[in-house]
Amino acid sequence: MIRKVLISIVIILVAFLLQTTFFQAIALAEVVPNLMLVVTVSYGFLRGRTHGMWIGLVCGLMMDMMYGSVIGLYGFILMTIGFFIGYIRKVFFTEGILLPIVLISVGDFVYCAYYYVTEFLLRGRLHLGFYLWHIILPELLYTVIVGILMFYLIRMLDELPSILKRREEEL
């Protein structure tokens, strides 16, 4: 249990550092992949709705501290995404690549839609076409490409403590 918590903390911190430093330097079309969303979707899918919700809250609050104009907006968005992705775990579990792509895509689209409503639409900026074409689609594509690699890395690291425990029991 402690190993899984420590691995989760390390994954969150590494994803946050990569998103705020490395990927800022290699932004494509002025967008950066949302690694904190990928972490939230991955844990929501791999461990269920409770873990997805808490990981999403932690990731979102870290983003709020770095980027947010209001504390709690990113936390709420990622928490709800992690919670609802956790429900999908009860219905689907597959080893294929299609479901993680769909989950990351849907999660990023919902995240961008939430963000558009709270940051632009409520302030009277109605340029949905511009926002969709120049922000949502490039970010979605970039997040999915990076997210697939990260999803499988998170899944491998998530299974590591149980593999180590089995090896300890065998000895």
Image (cartoon, grey):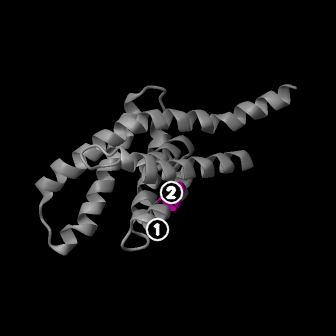
**Magenta span main SS:** helix
Does 122 sit left or right of 16 as displayed?
left
Which residue type carries mark 2?
Met
- Seen in the picture, residue 116 relative to 101 is either above or below; the reply is below
Q: Residue at x 12, y 65 (%)?
A: 126
Tag shown at residue 53: 2
Of the pair 51 and 128, the residue shown nearer to us: 128
Residue under the image location 43 percent in, 57 percent down? 78
Residue 169, position as x, y percentages in the image? 84, 30
For disc 1, the marked residue is 65
Which residue sits at x=83%, y=31%?
168
Does the image show residue 98? yes
Picture quarter containing residue 70?
bottom left
Residue 1 visible in the snapshot = no
Q: Position of residue 75 (x, y in %)?
A: 45, 64
State which mark lies toward you, 2 or 1.
1
Q: What residue is rendered at 49% in x and 56% in y?
A: 56
Q: Is residue 99 above or below residue 78?
A: above
Segment tinted magenta in the rendering = 55-59
Looking at the image, which is closer to me, 62 or 114? 62
Q: With 98 as the anchor, is 109 left or right in this view?
A: left
**Residue 127 at x, y = what percent?**
12, 61
Amino acid type, callout 1: Met
Dot 2 or dot 1, earlier in sequence: 2
Q: Position of residue 72 (x, y in %)?
A: 43, 70
Residue 171 sits above or below residue 150 on the image: above
